[in-house]
Image: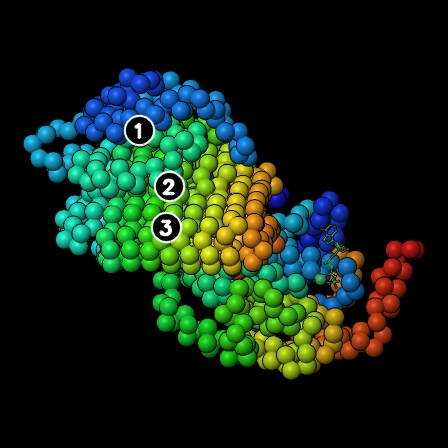
């Protein structure tokens, strides 16, 4: 009986699995220096950037896939992937003209790219496969000195800024996937907020994979100069395909003195089907540095998609009195696997970090929290509080916590709490008895459980995320 | 309104209900008394559709419909309410959210529009007053950290919100202090209408001083073995269950 209950609510369908039929330029499969040079030429890159790519590639050849995560990763053939795919422009006359098919695609995803139709208070950089297809409100933001454009454009128009900060938070040699990204990264967003400016809109990037057998390797760089503020959102979806697709992105954030950056993600890559076929392999390196005094970075993520998620948005708290937050809800259903968490590296004095991780597992899903809190010798009065909760729906799924602490300063206070709970049949029946269906009951309980994190998201996203949680878990308890 | 015919049911393969017959008409109050483990709560589970209990024989007709074919949520929407002997805690789900979902689900079933936020809050306030329920409780998660008595009062509050046709109160009086008992009983009486009915499961005659039953049934070993009027409760209070047990068991031994 309990089996039935637990089996039914997680059978929801992925709503973003359609493909767009557009003419796409795709590089031949395989990875070698030739391909990397081609990417660089395609993007008209300066010499130093090509050098960065080649250096990364050569280093990558010496590296091995990491195996320490609590994940079962099938072997990936890196020669069976195409490293560049871009929708071909129909009329190269105007830079800003976007193929109507692409506009339609983003409309369908709820991301209108015409500024008249756009969500109020939100500027969007839309990335399809390897390139940015449109960035809205660029001009309005430029009036305030804010740079918000695709990464490729930034390389052309703001090479000094890019060169100064690229790889400054995530070095090219950081880890297997980051190094691969550094060699082959395609497009992504670039943000620069000048001194003393509060960005008046939410900035957001929407990533869409469309082409098959291609990898997506975006690169995002956000620099918040002194006394500035920006809230940034990232969304992503992909078509349903039987084969697995690789996604290995890098996000780097730099917050200078008194600057604050809020980075929110609703990750909804295709998770694969109920039997575990297909889905995105999501290996992402996200890291921010609180470089200046009193700076602040917060990561908020709602992870519902991908077949495999390997992701640890982290912060280096270098400036004195700087603070960092990590709020996460990660859902694994069917055969999804997630190994996600954060690293908080306290270097400065009086630095503070707060970790709140909420894992939800259903079906055969495996959900791991992995977190590191490191307090260096000089980080007097550093403070960390970590709370890791797991919620289980059913008894075939798993939840695991791997908290690591490395404290080298006696004045530091580091606290960790963890709980595991299960949605019980008693709870479900109690709701049923009040006229609430099992699906709605699971929705109520899950959203209640995740509320603290969801509340950190900007309004429109919070509503979306709430719906998404419910859809993702539809059918998992019946 | 409710007709139970020769109902047999088991939990984990063990037969608990062994031929229950009971008819409840609109406007009536029935009390069920009986020793621990007799199967009183099991009967309440069967009526409300708890999947832990398997019905092996018999039928239940509720307002002309075959109750056993309905999902638990539809039974609720049809007007069956169970005040749980052990109300369940649901951390993270606020009482307000829970009740709004419940009320609107019932309305949807009746093809009514959901209540507006203002109307809903008005209804909450009105019903809270009826059962003298503390504001602080309704701003918390469902039953989480509630005291035993608070949980029971919360059950009656929910009953007031949902206005059921058939309310089953499973030992709602246990754990209530004297004042709370009076308030809860008053609540039940105020909600009494000619078109609804109440089934009260209790161990204590004193509740029946407040909620006056039309019938008292004695439940023993999975069956109703004796039915009388309110005086039967007084008699039980005085003599205990031994004489009933003897009465029931003697013919079997012959
Ligand atoms: N999950 C279960 N597995 C096995 N037996 C069960 C289970 N649940 C209930 N029972 C048994 O069913 C019988 C009837 O239980 P029930 O709760 O209906 O009694 P009750 O009359 O309500 O008793 P009380 O007055 O103590 O509340 C008891 O013997 C109990 O042990
Ligand atoms: Mg009982």
State whether residue B128 appears in this view: yes
The secondary element bearing badge 3 is classed as loop
Quickly name the residue at label 2. Answer: A169
First-in-chain label (3 vs 1) = 1
Q: Is residue A445 visible?
A: no
Q: Where residue A56 sits: x, y (%)?
A: 36, 27
Callout 1: chain:
A
Residue A80 horizontal side relative to residue A229, left or right: right
Query: Which quadrant holds residue B89?
Result: bottom right
Q: Are marks 1 and 2 on the same chain?
A: yes
Expressed as whole percent of the image width and height from the top left, the position of residue A112 reads 21, 45
Tell me the quarter of the image containing the N terminus of chain A: top right
Please, what secondary structure does the residue beneath circle 1 have?
Answer: helix
Per the image, the residue denoted by label 1 is A52
Please name the residue shown 7% across and 32% down the image. Answer: A93
Q: Earlier in the sequence, mark 2 or mark 3?
A: 2
Q: Residues within 10 Å of mark 2 (few under 14, many from 20)?
A: some
Q: Residues within 10 Å of mark 1 (few under 14, many from 20)?
A: some
- Residue B186, numbered circle: none
Residue B60 x/y as whole percent:
61, 55
Mark 3 burial class by Cα count in 10 Å: few <14, some 14-19, many 20+: many
Q: Would you place residue A454 above or below residue A365 in this image?
A: below
* Residue located at (25% from left, 51% from top): A193
Towards the viewer: B206 or B139:
B139
Separation of residues labelled 2 and 3 (CA atoms): 10 Å
* Residue highlighted by disc 3: A291
């Amino acid at each position: 009986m309990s089996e039935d209950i637990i089996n039914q609510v997680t059978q929801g369908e992925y709503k973003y699995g359609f493909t767009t039929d557009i003419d796409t330029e795709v590089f031949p499969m395989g990875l070698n220096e030739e391909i990397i040079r081609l990417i660089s030429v395609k993007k008209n890159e300066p010499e130093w950037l090509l050098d960065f790519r080649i250096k990364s590639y050569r280093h990558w050849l010496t590296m091995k896939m990491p195996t320490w995560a609590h994940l079962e990763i099938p072997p990936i053939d890196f020669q069976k992937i195409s490293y560049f795919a871009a929708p071909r422009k129909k009329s190269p006359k105007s830079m800003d003209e976007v193929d109507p098919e692409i506009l339609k695609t983003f409309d369908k995803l709820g991301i209108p790219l015409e500024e008249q139709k756009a969500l109020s208070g939100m500027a969007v950089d839309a990335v399809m496969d390897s390139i940015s297809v449109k960035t809205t409100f660029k001009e309005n933001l430029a009036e305030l000195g804010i740079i918000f454009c695709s990464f490729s454009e930034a390389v052309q128009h703001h090479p000094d800024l890019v060169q100064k900060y690229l790889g400054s938070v995530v070095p090219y040699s950081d880890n297997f996937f980051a190094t691969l990204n550094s060699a082959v990264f395609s497009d992504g967003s670039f943000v620069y907020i000048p001194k003393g400016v509060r960005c008046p809109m939410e900035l957001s990037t929407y990533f869409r994979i469309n082409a098959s057998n291609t990898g997506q390797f975006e690169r995002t760089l956000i620099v918040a100069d002194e006394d500035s503020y920006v809230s940034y959102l990232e969304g992503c979806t992909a078509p349903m395909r039987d084969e697995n697709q690789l996604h290995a992105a890098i996000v780097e954030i730099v917050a200078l003195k008194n600057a604050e950056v809020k980075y929110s993600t609703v990750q909804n890559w295709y998770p694969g089907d109920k039997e575990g076929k297909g889905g995105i392999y999501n290996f992402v390196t996200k890291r921010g540095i609180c470089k200046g005094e009193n700076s602040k970075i917060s990561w908020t993520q709602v992870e519902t998609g991908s077949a495999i998620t390997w992701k640890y948005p982290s912060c280096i708290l270098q400036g004195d009195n700087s603070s960092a937050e990590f709020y996460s809800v990660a859902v694994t259903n069917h055969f999804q696997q997630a190994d996600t968490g954060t690293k908080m590296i306290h270097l400065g004095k009086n630095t503070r970090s707060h970790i709140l991780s909420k894992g939800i597992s259903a079906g055969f899903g495996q959900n791991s929290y992995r977190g590191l809190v490191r307090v260096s010798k000089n980080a007097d009065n550093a403070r960390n509080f970590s709370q890791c909760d797991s919620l289980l729906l059913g008894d075939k799924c798993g939840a695991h916590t791997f908290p690591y602490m490395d404290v080298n300063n006696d004045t530091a206070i580091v606290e960790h709490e963890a709980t595991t709970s299960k949605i019980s049949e008693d709870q479900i029946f109690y709701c049923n008895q009040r006229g609430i269906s099992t699906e709605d009951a699971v929705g109520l309980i899950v959203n209640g459980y995740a509320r603290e994190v969801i509340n950190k998201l900007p309004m429109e996203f919070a509503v979306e995320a709430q719906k998404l949680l419910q859809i993702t878990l539809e059918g998992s308890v019946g | 309104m409710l007709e139970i015919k020769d109902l047999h049911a088991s939990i984990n393969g063990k037969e608990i209900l062994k031929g229950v017959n009971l008819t409840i008409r609109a406007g009536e109050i029935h009390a069920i008394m009986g020793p621990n483990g007799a199967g009183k709560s099991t009967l309440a589970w069967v009526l409300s559709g708890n999947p832990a209990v398997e019905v092996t024989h018999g039928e239940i007709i509720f307002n002309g419909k075959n109750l056993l074919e309905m999902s638990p949520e539809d039974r609720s929407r049809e007007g069956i309410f169970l005040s749980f002997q052990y109300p369940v805690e649901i951390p993270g789900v606020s009482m307000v959210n829970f009740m709004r979902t419940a009320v609107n689900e019932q309305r949807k079933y009746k093809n009514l529009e959901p209540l507006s936020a203002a109307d809903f809050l008005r209804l909450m306030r009105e019903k809270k007053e009826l059962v003298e329920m503390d504001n602080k409780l309704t701003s918390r998660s469902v039953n989480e950290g509630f005291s035993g008595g608070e949980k029971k009062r919360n059950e009656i509050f929910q009953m007031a919100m949902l206005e059921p046709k058939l309310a089953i109160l499973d030992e709602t009086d246990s754990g209530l202090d004297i004042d709370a008992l009076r308030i809860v009983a008053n609540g039940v009486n105020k909600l009494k209408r000619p078109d609804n009915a109440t089934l009260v499961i209790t161990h204590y005659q004193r509740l029946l001083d407040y909620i006056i039953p039309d019938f008292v049934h004695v439940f023993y070993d999975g069956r109703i073995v004796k039915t009388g009027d309110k005086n039967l409760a007084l008699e039980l209070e005085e003599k205990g269950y031994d004489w009933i047990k003897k009465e029931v068991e003697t013919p079997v031994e012959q």
